[in-house]
Amino acid sequence: MEAKTCVGGGGTAIASRARDAIALDRPLPIGSVPTPALLVDAAALERNLERMAAHARAKDIALRPHTKTHKCPLLAKRQMDLGAVGVCAAKVSEAEVMIDAGIEAVLVTSPVVTQDKIARVVALARRSREFQIVVDNAAAASALADAARSAGVSVGVLIDLDPGMGRTGISPGAPALELLRHLARLPALRFEGLQCYAGNVMHVNGWEERRRRSLQALERAIETKTLMERAGFEVRAFTGGGTGTFDIDCDVAAFTDLQVGSYLFMDVGYRRCGGRGGSVFDDFEPSLFVLATAISKPQAGYITIDAGFKALSADSGVPDLYDTAGVVYKWGGDEHGILVLEAPSRPIELGDQVTLIVPHCDPTVNLYDVFHPHRDGVVEELWPITARGKSQ
Ligand SMILES: Cc1ncc(COP(=O)(O)O)c(C=O)c1O
């Protein structure tokens, strides 16, 4: 473990590669946190983590949480402590951060094809026998196998199946079986299973419709598993699924583990797509917020805050206000948001803070160096987002 760094007054001029919690030299009430800042309700976060872990235990399915959401080794370790069998990383550089932090079982969920990335993959496989990566192309698999053989290392691989999304993955059925036969001729690669992540169904509106679409998207992947087993191959892992289907895919017998990511924070995008219990997806609580400050009031009925495109990812619409009803956020550019004060449930004056539920958690997290976790309104430490910007 690295020694705890100590910084004053909520200053975030910290070593961005820190991995452990950074103690503040004095507790910081939320009202004194410099904004915009990424705030975490530590108790809500912990409830989300424990809820998902309990769900997985009850359903007898493993968790392999995706670290692309939080990019924070400290949170990955908490997920492992709660029973996860490993974690996912979107890219090689994200996996490097997790392995540097001592997490051995890391699955890279995107394929690599270039020699530089292949060399880094081989280096990771040398460091951890539990490291895995997906493949979806025979030539790229051969290149990986060549590099692994030269280095005297074996690499665990999963075949990534395209669930009909057209993003990554090989087509299920015969093309996937053909790729597996190819892998079987490459002794430097160990075939360990299948990945099928139906990202296109995660935010389908309404739980019933999402369930229908998820089961449909997985059908051919499940058939492919059977096809491979009938051909004499052992398919140990079948991994995929996300927050939107956490209570759907857990009942699909083929799955060995779920790659849930957003559940620990939740965001506006997930909340509005509805859950099993109704029109708001509230199985997990919002625990991630952007804290902003009202800084200007050039027109009546509006107030401008210091959080715009550089503070909030804009791909999934606008943030919701967490602590105030009757106010709508409008983008005000890179640095600003404009609050439309329709019928505010409390007055918002210059200098006041507002708490925003983020539209989309993953890309918002990637905008910050640290989380400000608070307990009962007081921040005592910062959590470094060590893999921030690690999208290589
Ligand atoms: C391959 C893969 N698995 C899992 C996840 C996690 O999904 P979610 O954040 O919806 O839980 C993602 C998110 O994009 C992903 O790309």
Image: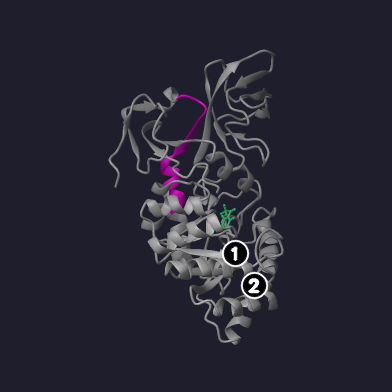
Q: Amino acid at mark 2?
A: Ala
Image coords of residue 13 (percent x, y): 41, 28
Say which of 159 and 164 sits in front: 159
Position of 93 relative to 30 (above/below): below
Q: Which residues are magenta?
A: 34-49
The colour scheme of the drawn protein is one colour
Mark 2 is surrounded, within 10 Å at the Cα level, by few (under 14), some (14 to 19) or many (20 or more) other residues, namely: many
Q: Which mark is residue 65?
A: none
Query: Mark 1 against mark 2, which lies toward the viewer?
Result: 2
User: Is residue 282 something one can see in this rendering?
Assistant: yes
Residue lying at 68% horizontally and 38% vertically, measured from the top left? 317
Q: Is residue 94 magenta?
A: no
Q: Residue at x 60, y 25 (%)?
A: 345
Was residue 42 drawn as part of the magenta stretch in this picture? yes
Q: Quadrant of residue 232?
A: bottom right
User: Residue at label 2?
Assistant: 221
Task: Identify residue type, mark 1.
Answer: Ile
Q: How many marks?
A: 2
Q: Element type at marker 1?
A: loop
For label 1, the crowd category at 10 Å Cα-Cα, with few meaning under 14, some 14 to 19 and many 20 or more, is: some
Residue under numbered circle 1:
248
Above or below, 226 relative to 356: below
Task: Give the CA separation, mark 1 to mark 2.
Answer: 16 Å
